[in-house]
Amino acid sequence: MLHAVGMCDEYPQIKHPWQGQPYDCEFEAGMVLCVESYCGEVGGRDGVKLEQQILVTDDGIELLFDYPWDARLMD
Protein backbone atom coordinates (compact mmCIF):
# COMPACT_ATOMS: atom_id res chain seq x y z
CA MET A 1 0.00 0.00 0.00
CA LEU A 2 1.22 3.50 -0.74
CA HIS A 3 -0.32 6.73 0.53
CA ALA A 4 0.50 10.38 1.13
CA VAL A 5 1.54 11.54 4.61
CA GLY A 6 -1.38 12.43 6.86
CA MET A 7 -3.57 11.17 9.63
CA CYS A 8 -5.29 8.33 7.78
CA ASP A 9 -4.19 6.93 4.40
CA GLU A 10 -4.28 10.28 2.62
CA TYR A 11 -4.75 10.94 -1.12
CA PRO A 12 -3.07 10.07 -3.36
CA GLN A 13 -2.88 6.39 -2.58
CA ILE A 14 -2.50 2.98 -4.14
CA LYS A 15 -4.36 0.29 -2.22
CA HIS A 16 -3.66 -3.43 -2.04
CA PRO A 17 -4.56 -5.21 -5.30
CA TRP A 18 -7.58 -6.99 -3.79
CA GLN A 19 -9.11 -3.72 -2.50
CA GLY A 20 -9.59 -1.93 -5.81
CA GLN A 21 -8.32 1.56 -6.54
CA PRO A 22 -10.56 4.42 -5.37
CA TYR A 23 -8.82 7.19 -7.36
CA ASP A 24 -6.93 7.99 -10.49
CA CYS A 25 -3.84 9.83 -9.29
CA GLU A 26 -0.44 11.03 -10.38
CA PHE A 27 2.63 11.37 -8.25
CA GLU A 28 4.63 14.56 -8.66
CA ALA A 29 8.04 15.80 -7.55
CA GLY A 30 7.85 17.23 -4.04
CA MET A 31 5.29 14.75 -2.70
CA VAL A 32 6.13 12.77 0.43
CA LEU A 33 4.64 9.28 0.41
CA CYS A 34 4.48 6.32 2.79
CA VAL A 35 5.12 2.82 1.42
CA GLU A 36 3.70 0.05 3.61
CA SER A 37 4.67 -3.61 3.43
CA TYR A 38 3.34 -6.51 5.49
CA CYS A 39 5.81 -9.36 5.83
CA GLY A 40 4.66 -12.67 7.22
CA GLU A 41 4.00 -16.29 6.39
CA VAL A 42 1.01 -16.74 4.07
CA GLY A 43 -1.82 -18.00 6.25
CA GLY A 44 0.34 -17.50 9.33
CA ARG A 45 -0.70 -15.76 12.53
CA ASP A 46 2.22 -13.36 12.92
CA GLY A 47 4.02 -10.83 10.76
CA VAL A 48 5.43 -7.33 10.77
CA LYS A 49 4.29 -4.15 9.01
CA LEU A 50 7.14 -2.03 7.70
CA GLU A 51 6.58 1.54 6.55
CA GLN A 52 9.01 3.82 4.76
CA GLN A 53 8.65 7.48 3.87
CA ILE A 54 9.94 8.63 0.51
CA LEU A 55 10.23 11.95 -1.29
CA VAL A 56 9.33 11.96 -4.98
CA THR A 57 11.98 13.90 -6.92
CA ASP A 58 12.46 14.81 -10.57
CA ASP A 59 15.02 11.98 -10.76
CA GLY A 60 13.12 9.27 -8.87
CA ILE A 61 12.72 8.86 -5.12
CA GLU A 62 14.73 9.66 -2.00
CA LEU A 63 14.37 7.65 1.22
CA LEU A 64 13.63 9.97 4.15
CA PHE A 65 14.96 7.74 6.89
CA ASP A 66 18.20 6.04 7.76
CA TYR A 67 17.16 3.89 10.71
CA PRO A 68 18.29 0.30 10.08
CA TRP A 69 15.87 -2.64 9.99
CA ASP A 70 16.30 -5.16 12.81
CA ALA A 71 17.95 -8.21 11.21
CA ARG A 72 15.92 -10.52 13.52
CA LEU A 73 12.77 -9.43 11.68
CA MET A 74 14.19 -10.13 8.22
CA ASP A 75 14.42 -13.95 8.45
Image (cartoon, grey):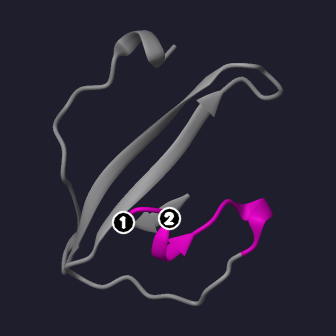
Residue 40 drawn above or below residue 57? above
Hey, what amino acid is under mark 1? Gly
Residue drawn at (43%, 54%), measured in percent from left and top?
35
Q: Are marks 1 and 2 in contact (CB under 8 Å)?
A: yes
Q: Is residue 11 magenta?
A: yes
Query: What is the number of the mark on residue 53?
Result: none
The image quadrant of residue 61 is bottom left
Task: List x then y, in percent, for residue 20.
Answer: 75, 73
- Seen from the viewer's position, the closer of residues 23 and 17 is 23
Density class for disc 1 (Cα within 10 Å; few <14, some 14-19, many ≥20) is few
Q: Which residue is mark 1?
A: 6
Task: List x then y, in percent, for residue 48.
Answer: 54, 27
Residue drawn at (68%, 77%), measured in percent from left and top?
21
Residue 40 drawn above or below residue 37? above
User: Separation of disc 1 and disc 2 at Cα?
Assistant: 7 Å
Magenta-drawn segment: 6-20
The image quadrant of residue 41 is top right
Rendered-image quadrant of the N terminus: bottom right
Residue drawn at (63%, 65%), measured in percent from left and top?
15
Hey, what amino acid is under mark 2? Asp
Q: Which residue is mark 2?
A: 9
Element under disc 2 = loop
User: Residue farthest to the top?
Assistant: 72
Element under disc 1 = loop
Task: List x then y, in percent, for residue 58.
Answer: 19, 81
Q: Is residue 66 magenta?
A: no
Residue drawn at (41%, 44%), measured in percent from left and top?
51
Left or right of residue 10, residue 6 in this image? left
Density class for disc 2 (Cα within 10 Å; few <14, some 14-19, many ≥20) is some
